Amino acid sequence: MRVFCGIDWAEAHHDIAFVDEAGELVAKRRIKDTAEGFGELLQMLAEAGDDPAEPIPVAIETPRGLLVSALRGTGRRVYAINPMAVARYRERHTVSRTKSDHVDAMTLANILRTDARAHRPLPDDTDLARAIAVLARAQQDSTWLRTRASNELRSLLREYFPTFLDAFAGRTTNLAGRDARAVLALALTPAAAAKLSRARIATALRRGGRQRGIDPLAQRLHQALRKPQLHQPPLVEQAMGEQARALLAVLNTECDNVDRLGEAVAEAFAQHPDYQIITSCPGLGDQLGARVLAELGDDRALKAYAGSAPITRASGRSISITHRTIKNDRLAAAGFVWAFAASTNHEPARAHYQRRRENGDKHPGALRHLFNRMLGQLFHCLHTGQTYDAGNAFTRALPTAA
């Protein structure tokens, strides 16, 4: 008789439950989040009839952590069940909204018993693919934090130093550029900016890494920072300058993190067997290609997982086709950037995007449709072991990942 395992994960301990094919409880225990606790879990699995040829599957509410990594190392299928789905399954057996860790562990085990086919097990990725995923996600998180820090600093400067934003308005849309950060470090207030000489601005630009066009840019910034503007009271302006200093320090840290993690992920991604295939696709470079690989994994995800495949809702005479809101947000974010880069620099992709716009799609919808098409092409290339062929990519139907 088959046995299924459910684990209710917590920070310091985990509740384990085993159920058989009839839904009867076989064993239960609470273990600690330690090596000894994992040893107890392996002993429970062995006593429940664990077979190396067909290991007992495990359901848990998180795809991360040392426990999950150790379970995946045993070669068994591990299912990361969304906590919202677990809550819905729990309501099938009780309407009183009672809840306990033991009941949740049994619920997870019963999900595998009844609906394992409806859930996706964690991909059987290599250690290299998992390392790329760690680095790519960390680099993406740092990029988002950099954007947040830049927006916070911009919002503050609007309140007391708009001339600084105007000085760089024609060169960049954010403050993450090295030129802007280098000059702002010397001119945190309008009063300090008015005292800057062209020589000090030029020195700051060199310190920030600029190598060409330094003197003309220093001259233009020198004039722009001296333009008249409205002022906060002196004490308030000085206080806002100190706040800007703190926000600039955060922005500098996040910019450095993005650069450092970008180099690490590019180095790791170049070692992957599918590197040449993925980077042959238009719009996919080292960093964006690594993000796509991180979410697809070595066993390849589906288009529905990426959120690019549409949803059809039909009830009676009502039929609607909409985009997915439940998806892998990281893969969807990477796909939007991928589609935008391809539509900008690759003629067949740009023509496909224009056709979707002419058919009535708005910009996000056209990009999502292009991402859906290019994801299918990448799926085809990965499964056939060939690189991207621009001549055939948009002229024939390819096998899809859905």
Image (tube, rainbow, N blue to C red):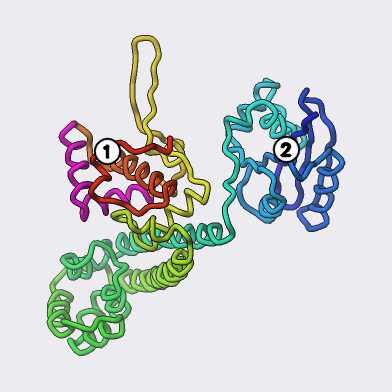
- Is there CB contact under 8 Å for labels 2 and 1? no
* Residue at the image position 72 percent from the left and 51 percent from the top: 74
Outermost residue, top direction?
A: 316
Q: Is residue 199 left or right of residue 258?
A: left
User: Residue 48 location, x and y as percent?
Assistant: 84, 38
What kind of residue is marked 1?
A: Arg
Q: Which residues are magenta?
A: 334-359
Residue at numbered disc 2 = 6
Front residue (pair 196, 89): 89
* Residue at the image position 18 percent from the left and 83 percent from the top: 214
User: Residue 287 location, x and y as percent?
Assistant: 39, 62
Q: Which mark is residue 396?
A: 1
* Residue at the image position 79 percent from the left and 58 percent from the top: 35
Front residue (pair 288, 187): 288
Q: Is residue 14 left or right of residue 315?
A: right
Can see residue 250?
A: no
Front residue (pair 175, 289): 289
